[in-house]
Image: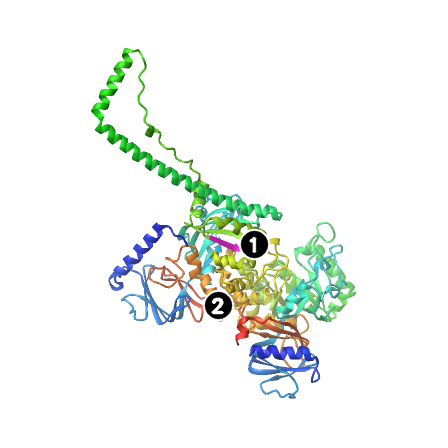
């Protein structure tokens, strides 16, 4: 079966565009993204978009069909990452850098980008580094190795102690708030967009107290978006839920703080939308699914974990209408897995972004035998 | 593998005793008896029994079979799959943190001297809940020489810390400490390990020579004494005469000296060398945390001379290039399949999650370790990750059970579901290490210690 897949893929690559850039994928299990799993279903792709999904999808006989004995899902989404940014993301010279656009730090050719794609991660939010800024810039949503998906859609706001600086204003939490309130009052640039609800926030808060104050701040300014680094947000699950914000949880280090994992589970159980932060190059891309597996071991149910890796995270990143689900009209960011995507023992064997094959696992001896 | 003969003798004695006592007769009214029934009992990797039971009496497995009846008063547990508890070969649970981080430990330091039953009770509880029931703990885990490692049960967290083996291994690190700046430092650290083993071996030879000389001396003395006793009268007469003559001539009388009078002197006791002698003799394994090619080459070349050495590589980032030699010399590698990123330390730069799979493919004996701390809890997750990167699931299971136990001489206690082993078992609702499987019961010494946590 896998040998057929490979042959078909080779034909597709060598033959170039055919049948109007269409192809069909048939997998043993198709994880649609809304909790349903279709058995032996077909995904029809045309011009980089999904045009049809289902068991009885009809298509022209000259459209190549790729058979996959395994699982198919939308590509995974990481809610915070630093792949390929290097020093571009950290500029602590000024407290507020609201116009800094992370789009210019995106390096599609960086080897870390290829590693993300190989792991089935097809959407990442590149964030500015914490260079003790109150506002470090505008994160950018990208498709690794391929393109920018959404820029100027959100603003990083740091309401944790790391937003202060010992040698320049503001050096206290009160100072941070003063700076922010002033900017909101002036309503210029990104702050105007935030006030108008046209932009979202990536709101950084660490301790429980910081989280609580950040939630108050967000309510005051009617902010939408998600919290990052808030390892105890689950202890305030009801308040987070009421704020309407989501939370980027993790990454959960091996042997890391258990309370952080339990916090994530509490958030999900309270109905707070969650996704996972990844933070390459500090971590390897495998950390994304491992964080989900760790949360599942602490009680997160399978479908919630899958949603946090795909559609849930895509919605928080503001691209839920484009990626994160296997549905007609969505962009064809698809991954063929050896098993359930949330299971760390399964791996990505083929990855498509915008309908293009960006990664194919090298054949192993085992596959040769098949 | 070279085992001390005393160890073998005690093992044989233990199993004979068990075989001699029929199960039915060994149960007394006060005994704690547990019978675990399962659709599948995984005795050890590759050997399973369908619809079988495990009988545990007073903490030890006394019978495994398909025809066991629950004795009266026995607690009966049922489940789908039963297997041995997982073993973490690279941990420090239960050991005082300062001692683990101590960079100046010596080969004769002992991990059991640093036990702190209260230090990581929560960590042990979590490890237990994820099925990790025993760990190899090591003080001085980043020191040049760490000393004797120990096997500890994670079975309790209330001040009692059962020690399964107090001299599980010797430990050294090469190229990971702050002092290993360049390749010359690293290679010299590898040479130092070789030198220490050599000096341990020489020390052993010196003592062996001494014992031989002592025995020869004792024999010579005995012969001389016998001869003297036999010739006593004549000798006394001769001596008296010599004393008399000396007196007449006004000379000082000198006692006749016997060559045998010079008793051989013992070599100076050296605790460090004595510790390394046990390594050189293969009495205990030597775990060397080492990653890069240059120092691996130095270590492997340097240790070829020790035909009884039981080397174990830990970390082993660049071991793939040495796979054939490692397989040939039966040197196991403890991998740590953690998802480390590009900003990891220099010695882990080429760390690859598929290392376990690639080594196993080349017939190297692969073990999996959590790397210490509360990470023991995540050992099954790390094993899953290794499986996700190509390691055969049964290989991963063996690495966490029998192979770990055999490598470190605790196979008579843990690692398999066999008669005589500790009743440290997992009852599961599916195959071990499968992501969808939950642990329904954790048994330590036949007692349920931890119900399942969470939904997965």
Q: Residue B265: image x %, image y %?
A: 38, 33
Residue found at x 28% / y 65%: B73
Q: Residue A103: image x %, image y %?
A: 74, 66
Q: Nearer the viewer, residue A16 or B352?
A: A16
**Chain where mark 2 sits:** B
What is the quadrant of residue A74 in the picture? bottom right
- Do discs 2 and 1 share a chain? yes
Q: Main secondary structure of the magenta part?
A: strand
Across the whole image, how many numbered discs are drawn on residues? 2
Name the side, left or right, on which A344 lies relative to A160: left
Give above or below for A48 relative to B190.
below
Is there any visible trace of residue B369 in the rendered image?
Answer: no
Write down the residue under mark 2.
B393
**Chain where mark 1 sits:** B
Q: Residues within 10 Å of mark 2 (few under 14, many from 20)?
A: some
- Write the start and end of the magenta stretch as one range: B311-317
Q: Which mark is residue B291?
A: 1
Residue A165 drawn in magenta: no
Residue B313 drawn in magenta: yes
* Inter-mark Cα distance, 2 to 1: 25 Å
Circle 2: element type: helix
Circle 1: element type: loop
């Amino acid at each position: 079966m896998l040998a057929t897949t490979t042959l078909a893929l080779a034909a597709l690559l060598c033959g170039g565009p055919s049948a109007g850039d269409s192809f069909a994928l048939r997998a043993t299990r198709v994880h649609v993204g809304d909790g349903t799993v279709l058995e032996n279903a077909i995904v029809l792709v045309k011009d980089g978009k999904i045009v049809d999904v289902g068991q009885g999808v009809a298509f022209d006989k000259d459209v190549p069909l790729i058979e996959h004995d395994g699982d198919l899902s939308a590509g995974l989404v990481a809610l915070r990452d630093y792949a390929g940014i290097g020093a571009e993301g950290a500029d602590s010279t000024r407290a507020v850098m609201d116009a800094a656009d992370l789009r210019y730090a995106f390096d599609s050719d960086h080897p870390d980008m290829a590693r993300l794609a190989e792991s089935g991660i097809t959407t990442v939010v590149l964030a500015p580094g914490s260079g003790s800024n109150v506002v470090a810039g505008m994160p950018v949503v990208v498709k690794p190795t391929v393109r920018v998906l959404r820029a100027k859609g959100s603003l990083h706001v740091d309401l944790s102690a790391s937003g202060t600086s010992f040698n320049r204003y503001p050096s206290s939490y009160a100072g941070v708030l003063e700076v922010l309130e002033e900017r909101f009052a002036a309503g210029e640039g990104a702050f105007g967009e935030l006030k108008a609800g046209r932009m979202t926030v990536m709101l950084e808060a660490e301790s429980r107290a910081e989280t609580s104050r950040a939630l108050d701040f967000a309510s005051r300014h009617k902010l939408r978006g998600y919290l990052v680094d808030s390892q105890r947000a689950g202890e305030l699950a009801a308040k987070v839920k009421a704020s309407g914000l989501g939370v980027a949880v993790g990454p959960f280090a091996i042997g890391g703080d258990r309370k952080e994992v339990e916090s994530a589970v509490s958030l999900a159980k309270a109905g707070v939308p969650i996704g996972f932060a990844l933070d390459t190059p500090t971590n390897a891309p495998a950390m994304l699914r491992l964080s989900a597996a760790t949360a599942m071991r602490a009680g997160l149910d399978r479908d919630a974990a899958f949603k946090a890796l795909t559609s849930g995270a895509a919605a928080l990143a503001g691209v839920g209408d484009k990626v994160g689900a296997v549905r007609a009209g969505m962009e064809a960011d698809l991954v063929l897995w050896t098993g359930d995507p949330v299971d760390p023992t399964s791996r990505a064997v083929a990855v498509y972004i915008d309908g293009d094959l960006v990664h194919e696992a090298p054949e192993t001896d085992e596959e040769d035998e098949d | 593998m070279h085992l001390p003969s005393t160890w073998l003798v005690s093992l044989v004695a233990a199993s004979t005793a068990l075989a001699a006592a029929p199960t039915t007769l060994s149960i007394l009214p006060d005994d704690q008896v547990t019978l675990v029934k399962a659709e599948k009992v995984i005795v050890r990797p590759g050997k399973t029994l369908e619809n079988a039971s495990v009988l545990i009496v007073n903490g030890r497995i006394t019978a495994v079979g398909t025809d066991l009846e629950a004795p009266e008063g026995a607690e009966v547990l049922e489940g789908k799959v039963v297997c041995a508890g997982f073993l973490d070969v690279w941990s420090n649970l239960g050991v005082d943190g300062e001692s683990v981080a101590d960079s100046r430990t010596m080969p004769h330091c002992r991990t059991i001297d640093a036990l702190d039953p209260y230090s990581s009770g929560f960590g042990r509880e979590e490890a237990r809940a994820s099925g990790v029931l025993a760990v190899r703990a090591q003080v001085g885990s980043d020191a040049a020489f760490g000393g004797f490692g120990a096997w500890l049960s994670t079975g309790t967290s209330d001040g009692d810390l059962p020690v399964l083996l107090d001299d599980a291994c010797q430990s050294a690190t090469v190229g990971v400490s702050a002092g290993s700046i360049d390749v010359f430092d690293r290679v010299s650290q590898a040479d130092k390990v070789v030198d220490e083993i050599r000096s341990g071996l020489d020390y052993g030879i010196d003592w062996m020579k001494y014992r031989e000389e002592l025995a020869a001396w004792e024999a010579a003395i005995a012969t001389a004494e016998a001869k003297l006793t036999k010739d006593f009268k004549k000798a006394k007469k001769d001596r008296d005469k010599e004393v008399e003559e000396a007196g007449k001539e006004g000379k000082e009388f000198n006692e006749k000296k016997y060559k045998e009078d010079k008793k051989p002197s013992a070599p100076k006791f050296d605790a460090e060398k004595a510790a390394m002698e046990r390594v050189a003799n293969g009495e205990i394994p030597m775990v060397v945390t080492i990653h890069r090619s240059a120092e691996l080459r130095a270590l492997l070349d340097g240790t070829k001379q020790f035909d009884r050495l039981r080397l174990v590589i830990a970390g082993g980032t660049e071991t793939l290039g040495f796979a054939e030699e490692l397989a040939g010399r039966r040197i196991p590698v403890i991998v740590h399949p953690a998802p480390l990123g590009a900003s990891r330390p220099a010695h882990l730069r080429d760390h690859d999650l598929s290392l376990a799979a690639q080594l196993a493919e080349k017939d190297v004996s692969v073990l999996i370790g959590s790397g210490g701390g509360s990470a023991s809890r995540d050992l099954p997750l790390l094993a899953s990750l290794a499986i996700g990167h190509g390691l055969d699931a049964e290989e991963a299971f063996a690495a966490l059970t029998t192979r770990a136990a055999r490598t470190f001489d605790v196979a008579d206690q843990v690692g398999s579901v066999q008669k005589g082993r500790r009743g440290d078992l997992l009852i599961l609702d599916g195959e071990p290490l499968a992501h969808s499987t939950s642990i329904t019961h954790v048994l330590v010494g036949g007692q349920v210690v931890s119900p399942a946590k969470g939904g997965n």
